[in-house]
Image (cartoon, rainbow, N blue to C red):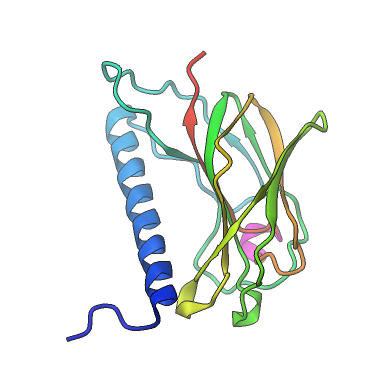
Amino acid sequence: MRYLAGSPRLIRGRLFVFVCILALSLSCNLSSLISGNSPKSGDSSDQEIASTSAPDIANSAETVEVLFDISNPKQVFNGASSPSKFTSKETWKITQIYTYHWNDGQGQEPSGTISLESEDGTLYGPWETIGVDGQGGVAYAYWVAYPDETIPAGTYTVIDSDPGTWSQNNDSDGAGFVTIQGIRVKE
C-alpha cells in the first residue's frame, strides 16, 4: 500500500501543505478555546481584524495566529482585480505570508515577491518567496514568504509581484488569495 505517491518534490509539497493546515487548525482551535473567539476569515477584500486580548498563559510560548485570510474552495481565475486589504488594531510580528497562483493549473515559476504597503506609503518587504506545490501537484501554486518582521497597527495592502497570475474569484470580490500569519506583539 502506497501512502505518499509522486516525486520527492510533490511529496514535500504535500507534506508542507498538510503541516500548514494542521498548524492552522491547531492554532485556530486553541485560540478559540482559550479566548472564546474564532479567527477572522472572510471573503471580502477589506476586513477589520477584531482586537481581542491575547491570553496570558504564564509566559507561555508565542502563539502563531492567522491575522488575515482571503481564500475559499471555489474555482479561481487569474488576475487579482481588487486590492487585498486588511486593518489591524494591534502590532504583529509577521511570520508567514502566502499567496496562491493556480494559473490555470500551471502554477507560476519562478516564484516572486510579496510586500505589505501601509496607508501612509511605508513598504514592508519585498520578501522573496519559495514555490510550493498546490492542489493536484501544481508546481509553484503557493508562493510562501517568511518575513519575520513587525508591523504596527494600521491598514495594509498586500502586493504580489505577479498580479496577473494571482488567483481570485467572485467570492473574494476579485481580491488575490492570501493568508498572513503572525504573533501578536504585547505593547
From the viewer's perspective, is residue 79 above or below residue 1?
above
Please state if 145 lies on the left or on the right of 125 as rendered. Answer: left
In the image, the segment drawn in magenta is 170-174
Residue 98, position in %: x, y? 56, 54
Magenta part, dominant SS: helix
> Residue placed farthest to the left in the image?
1
Residue 82, position in %: x, y? 76, 55
Residue 90, position in %: x, y? 56, 23
From the viewer's perspective, is residue 26 above or below residue 131?
above
- Residue that appears at 39% across and 55% down: 20
Q: Nearer the viewer, residue 162 or 10?
A: 10
Res 49 → quadrant: top right
From the viewer's perspective, is residue 133 above or below residue 63?
below
Please state if 42 lies on the left or on the right of 116 as rendered. Answer: left
> Residue placed farthest to the top in the image?
187
> Residue placed farthest to the right in the image?
121
Q: How many marks?
A: 0
- Residue that appears at 37% across and 33% down: 63
171 magenta-colored: yes
- Residue that appears at 69% across and 64% down: 166
Res 161 → quadrant: bottom right
Q: Nearer the viewer, residue 71 or 3?
A: 3
- Residue that appears at 75% across and 62% down: 163
Residue 174, position in %: x, y? 71, 61
> Residue placed farthest to the front in the image?
8
Q: Quadrant of the N terminus?
A: bottom left
From the viewer's perspective, is residue 18 above or below residue 86?
below
97 magenta-colored: no
Q: Nearer the viewer, residue 84 or 122?
A: 122
